[in-house]
Amino acid sequence: MIDDENSNSYEVWKKKGSPQNPTEDQITALEKAGQLSQITNKKIKISAGKTVVPLELKRQAVALVKLDW
């Protein structure tokens, strides 16, 4: 999920004071913040070839749903 608190290196960069020349530690933190975070790893039921994926997103958020079967 990507929103203002998850997987968003830009927001972390702003919280750090928008450094123009970030330190190595800041770069590491920004790279980590930019990784896609996993919000769940639950198994969901499939009935008659259909399923419902419960997902609640904040305003202006995006989520990748990966289904394996």
Image (cartoon, rainbow, N blue to C red):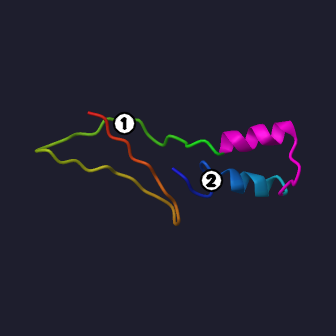
Q: Main secondary structure of the magenta part?
A: helix
In the picture shown, does residue 1 fall above or below 69? below
Residue at 55%, 53% in the rendered image: 2
What's the distance in space between the residues labelled 1 and 2, CA to CA?
22 Å
- Left or right: where 12 falls relative to 68: right
SS type, badge 2: loop
Which quadrant, please, contains the C terminus? top left
Q: Which residue is at 59% across, 49% downward? A: 6
Which range is magenta? Answer: 18-33
Q: Amino acid at mark 1?
A: Lys
Question: Mark 2 = which residue?
Answer: 5
The residue where tag 1 is placed is: 42
- What x and y, as percent, mark residue 26? 81, 42
Residue 47 in percent (x, y) is at 14, 43
Residue type, numbered disc 2 = Glu
- Residue farthest toward the bottom in the current orientation of the protein: 59
Locate residue 29, reporting x and y percent: 75, 40
Q: Is residue 38 left or right of residue 51?
A: right
Q: Secondary structure at mark 1?
A: loop
In depth, the one of 16 and 30 nearer the eye is 30
Compare marks 1 and 2 and give the one earlier in the sequence: 2
Q: Residue at x 44, y 40 (%)?
A: 40
Image mark for residue 3:
none
Q: Residue at x 79, y 41 (%)?
A: 27
**Foreground of the two, 30 or 44:** 30
